[in-house]
Amino acid sequence: MNKYVKIVLAALLFLSLIVVRALSAKLFYDPLKHYFLNDYLYTTMPSLNASRLVLHMFFRYCLNTVISLGIIWVLFKRKDYLKFCLYFYTTAFVILILLFVYLLQDNFESGYLLPFYIRRFIIQPLFILILLPAFYYQKRSSK
């Protein structure tokens, strides 16, 4: 693949991550967004539909994961990286969502910071910021 085509495709995929974030309020159910902005200091947790929230978090995570896998494929073109990422993303989601659901059932009685950061890792594509430098370093060190 041409170097310029690779750069344009990667930029478009990063732009699509930004679009998902920008349209998240319209696309996904998330009553905790306003709660975590500032209300958590003054009020109790809002009433919410937990199954709907988890389902929408799953959809958002999947969308971000597919785009992130696209970025990794465009930049590195290695199936072993994709397999690792797919395993990593799946394992991370299972662990994070189980923890989040447990804390949600507890109504965040043990504190709000842990559920805040778990939710952040689920709904935002933060893992790509960890995986890209790691794969780049591995690629450079193997030469």
Image (cartoon, helix red, strand yellow):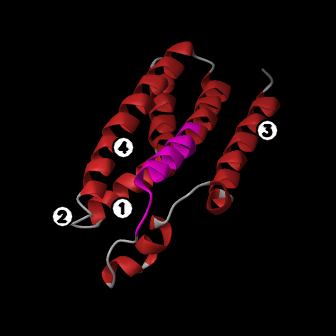
Q: Can the viewer see residue 143?
A: no
Q: Are marks 1 and 3 in contact (CB under 8 Å)?
A: no
Give whichever of discs 2 and 1 has the lower sequence position. 2
Q: Is residue 31 left or right of residue 21?
A: left
* Crowd rating for badge 2 (residues with CA inside 10 Å; few <14, some 14–19, many 20+): few
Q: Which mark is residue 116?
A: 1
Give whichever of discs 3 and 2 has the lower sequence position. 3
Q: Which mark is residue 8?
A: 3
Provide the secondary structure element on which disc 1 rests: helix
* Type of amino acid under label 4: Ile
Q: Is residue 9 left or right of residue 37?
A: right
Q: Which residue lies most toward the left here? A: 110
Give whichever of discs 1 and 3 has the lower sequence position. 3
What stretch of residues is rendered in magenta? Answer: 47-62
User: What percent of the width, then of the height, locates residue 32?
Assistant: 45, 66
How far separated are the C-alphas under marks 2 and 4? 17 Å
Residue 112 position by quadrant: bottom left
Q: Is residue 6 left or right of residue 106?
A: right
* Crowd rating for badge 4 (residues with CA inside 10 Å; few <14, some 14–19, many 20+): some
Which of label 3 and label 4 is nearer to you? 4
Q: Are marks 2 and 1 in contact (CB under 8 Å)?
A: no
Provide the secondary structure element on which disc 3 rests: helix
Q: Which residue lies most toward the top here? A: 79
* Type of amino acid under label 2: Ser
Q: Which mark is residue 97?
A: 4
Which of label 1 and label 3 is nearer to you? 1
Q: Are marks 3 and 2 in contact (CB under 8 Å)?
A: no
Give whichever of discs 2 and 4 has the lower sequence position. 4
* Type of amino acid under label 1: Phe
How far separated are the C-alphas under marks 2 and 1? 12 Å
Which of label 2 and label 1 is nearer to you? 2
Q: Which mark is residue 110?
A: 2
